[in-house]
Image: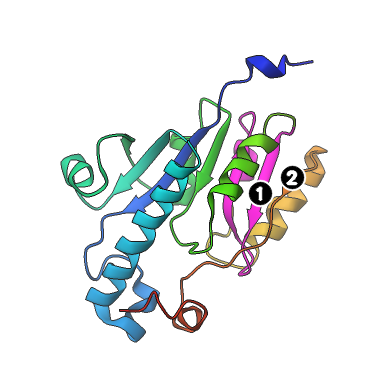
Amino acid sequence: MMDQAALPQPRIVLFARFPVPGSCKTRLIPALGAAGAARLHRHLAERTLGVLRQAGAQVTLAYTGAARADFVDWLGDDIILVEQAEGDLTARMLAVSEPAPVIFFGSDTPDLSPDHVRAAIAALQENDVVIGPAEDGGYYLIGMRRPLPQLLVDMPWSTDKVLPQTLARLSALGIAPVILPCLSDCDRPEDLARWPDLAP
C-alpha cells in the first residue's frame, strides 16, 4: 500500500488561450461579438486562476495564442507556464499529464469554487481518479493519481459523449472514480442566461 503521507501534492494544470478577439469563445460570438466573447474569456480565465490560487494550489498554466511574456503580463509570474503542445486536446493533455498525480481544469466554469478544487485534491489521496462532471456531458476537471492515457486518447471532445465514455473506460479498468458536484460550463449563447452578470 502507498504511504499516503508520501503522496505528492497533485499538479494543477489549467488550459488557457490568450483572449484575442475571434480566436476564443467562438460559439459565443453570435451573441456577444468577437470582442465581447474575448472579454468574457479573459474574465473567466482570470476568475478560474483566482479560484485555484484561493485553494492554495500551485498552478501550471498550459498556454496558447500568445508569447509567454504576454501571459506573465496578463496573469502574473507566480504560476508555472508551459506552452501547449501542437494537436488536439488529447495531444495537449498527454503532453502535460506526467508526472502524476495531476488535475486538469478548463477555464469555462463560472461556478467553480475553491471547495471543488480542495475536494479534487483530497480525493486523489486515496483514489485513482476524480471527475467534476459538466451538465453538457463533459467534465470541468479530471484528476489522476497515476498516468492513465487511455482516458484521453480517441475521445470525442466537445460532445456529450465525453463523460459517458470516460466512465465506461474507467469501469473496464476496474476503477471507481470520485464524482464531484455537477457544474455547468459557459460555452454557448443560451448559457449566458444562467450568469447574466457575465455578459458585457
Residue in view at x 78 percent, y 38 percent = 173
Residue 103: which disc?
none
Quick check: 4 above or below 124?
Answer: above
- Distance CA(mark 2)–CA(mark 1): 6 Å
Q: Does residue 149 appear left or right of residue 90 in this picture?
A: right
| Mark 2 / mark 1, whichever is N-terminal | 1
Q: Is residue 153 visible?
A: no
**x, y percentage for residue 175?**
79, 39
Residue in view at x 63 percent, y 68 percent = 135
Q: Quadrant of residue 96?
A: top left
Q: Does residue 93 appear left or right of residue 135 in this picture?
A: left
Q: Is residue 117 visible?
A: yes
Magenta part of the chain: 127-151
CB of mark 2 within 8 Å of CB of mark 1? yes
Q: Quadrant of residue 157?
A: bottom right
Label 1 neighbourhood size at 10 Å, few (<14), some (14-19), many (20+)? many
Q: Which residue is mark 1?
A: 131
Q: Does residue 106 appear left or right of residue 1 in this picture?
A: left
Question: 24 or 43, which lies in front?
Answer: 43
Task: Tell me the amino acid under the disc marked 2.
Answer: Val
Q: How many marks?
A: 2
Q: Quadrant of residue 73?
A: top left
Label 2 neighbourhood size at 10 Å, few (<14), some (14-19), many (20+)? some
Task: Tell me the amino acid under the disc marked 1.
Answer: Ile
Q: Does residue 133 appear left or right of residue 110 in this picture?
A: right
Residue 178: which disc?
2
